Image (cartoon, coloured by chain):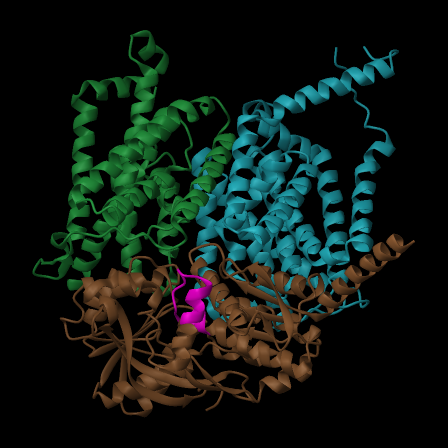
Chain colours: A green, B brown, C cyan
Amino acid sequence: MTLLANILIDGIAYGMVLFIISVGLSITLGLMRFVNLAHGAFAMTGGYLAAWLVGAQGWPFGWGLLAAVVLTGLLGAVLEALVLRRLYRRSELEQVLFTIGLTFLFVATANLLAGPEVQLIPLPAWLKTPVDLGIRTLPAQRLLVIAAGLAVLALSALVLGRSRFGIWLRATVDNTGAAAALGIPVKWVYAATFGVGAALAGLGGILGAELMPLEPYYPIKYLVLVLVVVAVGGMGSITGSAVAALALGTIETASKYLASDWGSLFFFLSMALFLAWRPQGLLVARRA
Amino acid sequence: MGMKMNWLGAALAVVGMAGAAQAQSVKVGIIAPFSGPFAHYGALMKAGAEAYVASQGGKLAGQNIEFVWRDEGGPNPANTRTLAQELVVKDKVDYIGGIVFSPNASAVAPVIQESKTPMVIFNAATSDITTKSDYYIRTSYTLWQVTVPAAQHAAKKGYKRVVTAVSDYAPGIDAETAFKAEFSKLGGQVTESIRMPVRTTDFAPFAQRIKASGAQAVYVFLPGGPPNLGFVKAYQENGLRQAGIEFLGTAETDEFDLQKFGDSALGLTTLFHYSGARDSAANKAFVAAVNKQNKEAIINYATVGAWDGMHVIHKMIEATGGKRDGDKAMAAAKTLKWESPRGPVSIDPVTRHITQNVYLRVVEKGQGGLLINKEVQTFPAQVDHGLTK
Amino acid sequence: MTSLSLHAPPLWRQVLPYAALLGLALLIYFVFPDQLPMAARIAALAIFVMSLDLVVGYGGLATLGHSAMYGVGAYAAGLLATHLTGNPLLGLLAGACAGAVLALLSGLFLLRYEGLTFLMLTIAISQIAQNLASKLRQWTGGDDGLSGFTIQKILGLASFDLQGRVAFVYCFAVMFICLWLMRRLMASPFGLACVGIHQNRQRMAALGTRIRWQLLKLYTIAGAFAGISGALAAQVAQIVGLDSLGFELSAEALVMLVLGGAGNLWGALVGTVVFASIHHWASTLNPYHWLFIIGGMLVTMVLVPRERWGQALSRRLQLFRRAAAPSGASS
């Protein structure tokens, strides 16, 4: 029973990190049909910025987190507006290659600026204290991750469903031409969406720094994980990403507890089975 | 005419000097990771090696030393073999040093055997590597060497049930096998042997498994860098010490990451062959030399592995008079005995592995509030127990 | 007006690239003998990238899991040499069979899907293979690699030497033969059908082609060549590591392919040589900064697409040709 509880708790925490990082990619893939393999680089950027602000500059954790997330979002939006926008009409292969090249540049820059070591984000004392849930103790940081994941899920549903921006976004996804004709500022929607996706990735990078250590090769190492979550969850579907991330995260955690010498085999096997069952993704966003 | 002779003479002199300089330069190829998550090893090995040469006045046995650096990257045996082959064939090195990962070390065996190039291993720790060629010498450690004392210590402390948690690759499996063998011999029981995939970043599930095992201590081995860091944090965050499971490690409190653990690392026990805080004249000189060469270099087992490795190469150059003679060099190396920064050491003539003290260390606060590994007990002159039973 | 010639290009034009390649090999052998070990590895890798070209360039299936076939080929050759015989040619055969079998079995499953799903599933297959190889440590040596096997003399003539001469001749010869075979194959009706599928699936289906069957055949053949490449590399290095099944290998091969140009096999060769050489040279300078170089190259290549200057170049060549042969040009 404790084992099951352990698997669920650790699995959900891991899954939430994957979700927060991947949701931005899912949206940009679904919205702009743009294969951005540099998405992991945003997660790394967010983490590095937070490590620098909170660690080296001594900012309080909350402010450092906020600043890092916002800065990463801005970086994403600017990158989109200046560079990535030109590639929307190119073939998938070219987008893949460009973003891989971009990823390499991020990796080399991170190494140049901060060296090859793992970057640690100093946590405030209240996040480090173990919380006793009765069945087991958990560092408070993991609970924060789960809470953040739920918040992102709720907020995205709210924004997409209720806000004007959400309506613009859904319209642009469904039919860009008609949306533009109706006066929706499509280019601005693209930039903003990309920026938000990047910001969320940054948040995921910061919160997940305990599970996925921040070092220059981060975007390459975790690229496959992020792609898997997006593909299994369905491009453009936020709930899909959440379900996929939680399911796969729990499976991976379970295999660590029960069959660690099989490595990540069950993760990829499950992924293959999910995709075979639902090639378009678990919960596909509607697209005209 | 005078001018012409001067010009000709000068030209001849220059050519002569260049020729002489070349003849006097001994080339040492060092293969270490300079990229990827383990790139700090390469930087530390470079610091240690260069500091040694500088401390000897810039020359070893009267010869100029020319280093050729090659990037090992990660575990990539085929690539490492090509690098070694190139070092021997193209760069014509006289000695090869370095190598962090065991599979990479094993891969170069055919190259050094055929070309009779002595290879000094600065880190890779699996026992059977040195058996694969007659030209290997190792100045780092092996898991058997440091684990047998650990099992002895565990038995002496009265532990009856211990769980082992190692990374799932050759050195880790060596650690597990060694601990089981010695601990059972002394009447203890290894209740569970946990193997963690090398690529693991999230150690919480393993920490939970250890907690649930009901053992009194956990014996740990992971490669240095991110895995070490992750595991020790998981040990701390999941309250394993509070649950009564003592930590018995090897290189996990490596000086490279030690400060990052903070005060919760105080009291962690490890058994290893080198502590940067060792209070000896040789060590102090070593630390000073490395810091002179590179102010930011951390003093840890990788740095000292390279330093002692260069010492062995120094003696081999001395024995061969700077000429390339693999067999003569190896014969000389097998007789070496010296006072290393880590304590008194010698090269075992049969296994060609370094015989050294293994220390029981505890993390304490040292000078300036920095965390150090304080040596509290010495297990003298440990051989490679994996090869010498 | 462009004339579509139904005649094959003249014989000398067909032979020229092969002769040039042979000339390059002779140059390396006699003038740059220090580079022979590196050149041997590049030749073996080139076969892999060419086999990837079959799938990506000709077949139009973007895959990031091709290393699975390379890896099983490498392990097959290593295991054969460890347990049965060190005969190199049998080792290549074992590699080819292993690669083909894996491609066939996985292709049956994979080719039901397209686009991103197909891509992700190819990644899944190679990751499953890699994790399985890691688990089956008693067969594969796990993270430590499969080593300790010896390869007998090639054709009973020469064993691998330290200088890398024999290795180079061996790898080059195998690569040369594979290149020729693959070119012949892709110029055949089968190859043209695959290109047709790449260009327009519905049209080919309307013409009666059994799409999945053709693609499966292509995938299997590509798998066989990838297996040969892996086996060759294993024999020359005498060690097989888990990285031969890794994602990084598949991704690097794709980059090499696109660098050189997909769809005609020569591009794959050029791309491999360029990428591997730059990587080797740049790593000796500074291993991390090499990522700046390759990242910059990729980014520039995409922003300034080859098609644009490729087209400009070919247009100029056509003008030149028309000027040189004014009669009979237009038909």
- Of residue A275 and residue A216, the one placed in the foreground of this image is A216
- Of residue B133 and residue C300, the one placed in the foreground of this image is C300
Left or right: B211 as drawn, with respect to B106: left
- Of residue C47 and residue A105, the one placed in the foreground of this image is A105
- What is the number of callouts on the image? 0
Query: Residue at image x 23%, y 78%?
Result: B217
Left or right: B70 as drawn, with respect to C31: left
- Outermost residue on the right side: it is B1
Check the image and report above or below for A26 versus A213: above
- Of residue A125 and residue B235, the one placed in the foreground of this image is A125
Q: Bounds of the magenta span?
A: B288-304
Quarter holding residue C212: top right
Residue A136: where, in percent of width, then height?
12, 62
Residue A102: where, in percent of width, then height?
46, 36
* Residue A17 visible to an observer of this rendering: no
Quarter holding residue A147: top left
* Residue B85 visible to an observer of this rendering: yes
- Outermost residue on the front side: it is B2
Left or right: B120 as drawn, with respect to C14: left
Residue B374: where, in percent of width, then height?
28, 78
Query: Residue at image x 46%, y 46%?
Result: C123
Q: Quadrant of the N terminus of chain A?
A: bottom left
Query: Residue at image x 19%, y 59%?
Result: A6
The answer to if B293 sits in the magenta stretch is: yes
Quarter holding residue A194: top left
Q: Quadrant of the C terminus of chain A?
A: top left
Residue A78: where, in percent of width, then height?
36, 26
The answer to if C24 sits in the magenta stretch is: no
Check the image and report above or below for B33 versus A119: below
Check the image and report above or below for A117 versus B16: above
